[in-house]
Image (cartoon, grey):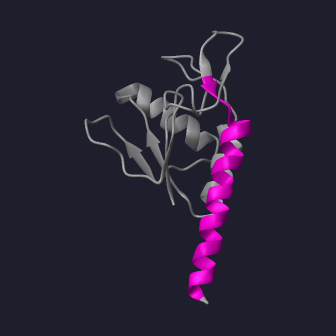
Amino acid sequence: MILAIDFDSTIVKDRWPGIGVDAGALYWMKKWQKQGVGLVLNTLRTYENLRQAVDYLTENEVYMTVIRKPTHHKVYSDYIIDDRAIGTPLLIDDVTGKPYVDWSVVGPIIDAKIAAELLNEKEKKK
C-alpha cells in the first residue's frame, strides 16, 4: 500500500513557512512504515522549505519512501491524506485558526484499510 501525505496542515499544524507542531500524524506514520507501507511526501514545499520538512520527519524517525517535488502530474498512491481533500475530517488550530487533519479519525480509518490489505495478502498466500 502507498499513502501520499501532505505536510502543512496535515502532518504538522500550519506555521508556514516554518514547521508547525505534530498534528497527530507521526504516531500513525511510524506505525505504518513498520508495517511496510510506502509513504510519499506530497507537498508543494520546495528548496529550503522542503529540506526543512524532510529534516523534521527524519528527526522524528519517519522516513519517506518518496519525496515528491511539485509537478502538474497526479501522484500515484492508494490513498491521499491532505487537509484540502473533500471529506477529510478537520480540527481548527486554536493558535492560528487554520484547519488541520484530525488524525484521531483519519488514522484508524487508514489503519483498518491497511489491516484488511495485509489480511488479504496473507489469505492469497495460502
Q: Is residue 73 left or right of residue 2?
A: left
Please identify the residue farthest to the bottom as the structure is shown.
126
Query: Which residue is found at the position 51% from the left and 61% from the top?
Result: 1
Residue 77 position (above or below residue 19): below
Residue 101 inside the magenta-drawn segment: yes
Task: Specify the quadrant of the image occupied by residue 114.
Answer: bottom right
Q: Where residue 91 appears, x then y in whole percent?
A: 68, 23
In the image, 99 versus 49, the foreground residue is: 99
Query: Which residue is found at the position 36% from the left and 29% from the top?
Result: 46
Quadrant in the picture for the C terminus? bottom right
Query: Which residue is found at the position 53% from the left and 18% from the top?
Result: 18
Q: Where residue 115 appears, x then y in whole percent?
A: 67, 63
Query: Which residue is found at the position 49% from the left and 27% from the top?
Result: 84
Residue 85 position (above or below residue 115): above
Please identify the residue farthest to the front as the structure is shown.
87
In the image, 41 versus 101, the foreground residue is: 101
Q: Where residue 66 appears, x then y in whole percent?
A: 42, 50
Residue 108 inside the magenta-drawn segment: yes
Region in magenta: 100-125
Task: Specify the quadrant of the image occupied by residue 119.
Answer: bottom right
Please identify the residue farthest to the left as the structure is shown.
72
Q: Is residue 103 left or right of residue 86?
A: right
Question: What's the magenta bit mostly, secondary-structure-wise?
Answer: helix
In the image, 68 versus 48, the foreground residue is: 68
Q: Where residue 77 appears, x then y in whole percent?
A: 43, 52
